[in-house]
Amino acid sequence: MSEHHPYFNDLIHSRRSVRKYDQHSEFDHDAVARSLELAVLSPNSSNMQLWEFHRVISDNERDQLANICMGQNAAKTANELVAFVITPYKWKSRAEMNAAQIRQAFDGREDATAKRALKYYEKLIPFVYRNDQLGLFGVGRKILSYCLGIKKPMVREVSKSDLRVCLHKSSSLAAMTFMMAMRAEGYDTCPMEGFDSKRAKKLLGLPKEAEITMIVSCGRRTEEGIYSERHRVPNQDIIISH
């Protein structure tokens, strides 16, 4: 079995959630731009890409958002803050984009694979992603999934709330890619969930249907920005072979 690439190994071990940054150190905002360009390449559910990455760079807005993040040092001392946002209301245009890509990729083919791929974005995705305010469509899908699942394996997570979880998973994958890319640039990050979501959405100009997965602060670490040695639950308690 081959070993991990030493650079990747070092990158993983050197990444920490930093609670305080050096405000006197130079900061290259282009590093954030480059890291977000890599985050865009992250895996996501059905390639729907229902996300947005909002950069907060100006001193005024950054101070406001730091206050909204409950005044955490990780936010107050950051050189830049990035909000990872899900946009479920854009599902229709994304499905059409993917269907067009499928048509181009399978141009001239009439085989089962091509038809199945096109049907996925033209039929199944609208069925799963279309929701009403009360979530009744999702309840109907849940019942159908249960009935079909009696005799064969079936995806059970089909409600409106299940879809919300799915999109936050994809957004989190992008955030992790971003944080590792920033570490490769020589900078540090801290993912934060402690914030007033209502005020944060207002500051960022987000519509009601959007949701913030997390806000990631960026900067260069100080010694007091890392509270202790990293510690984890023993591997044998969480890595389970079947």
Image (tube, grey):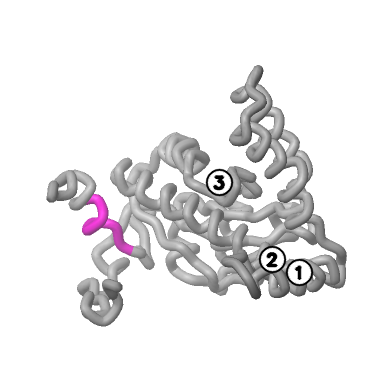
Residue linked to disc 2: 158
Image coords of residue 48 (percent x, y):
64, 45
The answer, for residue 24, to whether it is visible in the render is no
Residue 102 highlighted magenta (yes or no): no
Image coords of residue 118 (percent x, y):
69, 36
Residue 15 highlighted magenta (yes or no): yes
* Front label number (1 vs 3): 1
Q: Secondary structure at mark 2?
A: loop
- In this view, 96 is above or below 207: above
Region of the chain picked out in magenta, as a range? 11-16
Q: Amino acid at mark 1?
A: Leu
Q: Is residue 151 found left or right of 205 in the rendered image?
A: left
Q: Is residue 118 found left or right of 2 in the rendered image?
A: right
Identify the mark nearer the N-term, 3 or 2. Answer: 3
Residue linked to disc 3: 57
Question: Of 29 and 118, which appears nearest the observer?
Answer: 118
User: Label 1: few (<14), some or many (≥20) within 10 Å?
Assistant: some
Identify the mark nearer the N-term, 1 or 3. Answer: 3
Question: Which residue lies at the image location 82% right of the left edge and 61% below the top edge?
Answer: 131
Q: Which label sits on residue 144?
A: 1
Q: Is residue 26 found left or right of 110 in the rendered image?
A: left
Whether the residues at callouts 2 and 1 have beta carbons within 8 Å, the answer is: yes
Q: Secondary structure at mark 1?
A: helix
Image coords of residue 184 (percent x, y):
30, 43
Q: Amino acid at mark 3?
A: Ile
